[in-house]
Amino acid sequence: MQISSTQPTLDNSLSQPLAETLRQRRQCLANQIDFPVLLWSGRSSPRNFPANVYPFRASSHFLYFAGIALENTVIRLDGGKLTLFMDEGTAAAALWHGDMPKRAELAVQIGAEEAFPLAELKSYAEGAATIAAQDAATRLQQSHVLNRIILPANQSQSLDLSLAKAIVSLRLRHDPVALAELKKAAAVSVTAHQTGMQILPKARVESEIRAAMEAVAIAHNMTCAYRSIITVQGEVLHNDQYHHPITSGDLLLADMGAETEAGWAADITRTSPVSGQFSPTQRDLYDVVLAAHDACIAKIQPGVEYREIHLLAAQVIAEGLVNLGILRGQPDALVERDAHALFFPHGVGHLLGLDVHDMEDLGDLAGYETGRHRSDRFGLGYLRLDRPLRPGMLVTIEPGFYQVPAILQDPERRTTYAEVVNWDRLAQFSDVRGIRIEDDVLVTETGYEVLTAALPTQAEAIEAFIAS
């Protein structure tokens, strides 16, 4: 057994609030299902030879019920009872990684009634449901133990599908222990973004900004919740290259979020002028995106459909582009035709929790209310969340404007939208490649709380912060 050095140390027992919360989570699951469950933590994967591995990240479903990250470990849940299956650390492992906690010690810490070696797992597997692990080696182990092919939850049937739906119902709304972790991740992420803005005027390449921002997470014994997007090529939505030079006329799009030791994530995006001052064209489009961002957050409250929030973002962006002369026509008609998606092709946000796109390993089971299905429309096909908002849900709000060559130079789309896009006017905004503004927003009983509000969004505030 290996315990990643990036995961929490296990020298002390879990705190009483966490231990009680984990017990409550397991009991809530037991109240929804009447069959046993096996959840695997997963294992690290080799990069180029067996001993050189990628950083280990335990399965989020395992973390939700076990509370600590243990590699190559399985928990069995049955009627609220927890049983732990793991092997003891070997002498060879101790040589390289130090002494590991004993299985019995870990069982006490996570509230397990019993603990056994992995070799005994198969004896407890009859009739059990599971969630497919992300790494291939663990999925093979799951298939061997359960004597069946393990499919992704949204493709499975019977028990595995029922388990996935029950887990979704629990993880959609965050309990106080989870919220404390999420707020901790948000606070560190805000500091990381502030650090990036502070060094922006002196940076020469994107990697310098990335290094400064990610160093903040590391200094707080956290990791990044996803591969950071720190780029002057903001039109590449998930850009993971950091070698581009930074020049004074550029906008830097920084999308970075920290992940706590327990696995809880933040997700923030800001777009800043490298020179410290937005150009007139950059400011015009920035204010359009900000107007959409602010309108969407103001609309958040229990009972509101997230799909309507996305369409509100589309409407505000369409109105702004009409006012700037980039689009022609009535904004509502333009949204109906998906013309806004030429510049805002993705959804307005997603669930946030133990995963940055929370529970997306379950496909659309988590993001889409029962009976709803993903649209094939250009402007709705990338919508990640289509549910009514409920207290305790944490979502991102992240509208954007992008000039994506693959979209804007596509002959079919240029023909479809020929009469509604003023291409000559658009060319005057060539210094804007991509703008995104993203915050983490908690749905409360009466409205919302922006967990990342300490990081400015107003253009003047960003300019002032860089200048300071």
Image (tube, helix red, strand yellow):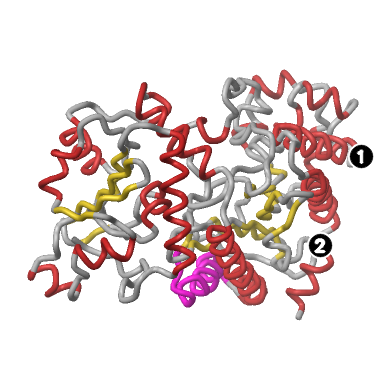
Residue 318, percent from left and from top: 82, 35
Instruction: State the CA–CA distance, disc 1 to disc 2.
Output: 19 Å
The residue positioned 20% from the left and 55% from the top of the image is 115
Q: Nearer the viewer, residue 94 or 61?
A: 61
Would you place residue 309 above or below residue 195 in this image? Answer: above
Residue 257, percent from left and from top: 55, 60
Query: Magenta region's main secondary structure?
Result: helix
Q: Residues within 10 Å of mark 2 (few under 14, many from 20)?
A: some
- Let me know if residue 62 is in the magenta part: no
Pointers 1 and 2 in contact (CB under 8 A)? no
Assign the N terminus to one quadrant of the image: bottom left
Q: SS for tag 2?
A: helix
Assign the C terminus to one quadrant of the image: bottom right
Q: Count how many numbered circles sit on residues in the image.
A: 2
Mark 1: amino acid: Asn
Q: Which residue is mark 2?
A: 459
Q: Residues within 10 Å of mark 1 (few under 14, many from 20)?
A: few
Q: Nearer the viewer, residue 255 or 433?
A: 255
Extent of the magenta region: 204-223
Q: Which residue is mark 1?
A: 323
Question: Is 173 left, or right, of 300 in this rendering?
Answer: left
Q: Nearer the viewer, residue 53 or 41?
A: 41
- Let me know if residue 218 is in the magenta part: yes
Would you place residue 118 above or below residue 384 in this image? Answer: below
Mark 2: amino acid: Ala
Question: Is 198 left, or right, of 172 in this rendering?
Answer: right
Task: Farthest residue to the bottom: give it.
Answer: 468
Residue 156, percent from left and from top: 36, 24
Of pointers 1 and 2, the one earlier in the residue sequence:
1
Q: Is residue 428 visible?
A: no
